[in-house]
Amino acid sequence: MLDIRELTTFTDFFIICNGTSDRMLQALATTLRDYIKKDLELIVNIEGESRDGWLVADLEDIVVHIFSPEMRNYYRLEQLWNKGKTILTLQ
């Protein structure tokens, strides 16, 4: 999780994750959508296609990016937003 509150006004945090296959990307997106709906009682649209290697969910204060390893390496959001504060990293 990357805290970018001091860098931008469109969101507060990025969550950046990746999956190793189209199927895994879709499963991550589906799980996120189901969690948001059930536990937070919100409707969220997830943009993108798993086959394209990048899905994104805009939750207003949090933007969730779900990448294939290739697309995560290509876009390098952690480096682009490197002035943000890393709050949590899981491997």
Image (spheres, rainbow, N blue to C red):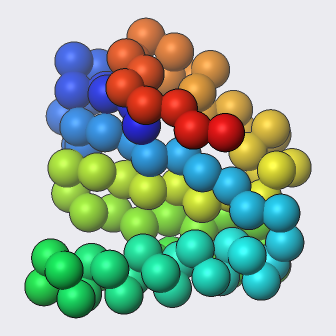
Image quarter of the C terminus: top right
Residue furthest out toward the left: 41
Picture quarter containing residue 83? Answer: top left
**Where does residue 89 sit, x and y in percent of width and height?**
53, 32
For residue 43, say whether it is visible. Answer: no
Front residue of 47/38: it is: 38
Kindly identify the residue that appears in the image at 42 percent across and 75 percent down.
32
* Left or right: residue 79 compared with residue 23: left
* Left or right: residue 1 compared with residue 20: left
For residue 58, say whether it is visible. Answer: yes
**Where does residue 12 sit, x and y in percent of width and height?**
23, 37
Q: What is the total number of numbered labels drawn onto the structure image? A: 0
Residue furthest out toward the top: 83
Image quarter of the N terminus: top left
Front residue of 87/46: it is: 87
Residue furthest out toward the front: 91
Kindly identify the residue that appears in the image at 53 percent across and 77 percent down.
29
Kindly identify the residue that appears in the image at 86 percent across and 49 percent down.
70
For residue 43, above or below residue 32: below
**Where does residue 85 sit, x and y in percent of width and height?**
37, 17
For residue 39, above or below residue 13: below
**Where does residue 10 sit, x and y in percent of width and height?**
24, 43
Picture quarter containing residue 75? Answer: top right
Kindly identify the residue that appears in the image at 54 percent across and 46 percent down.
16
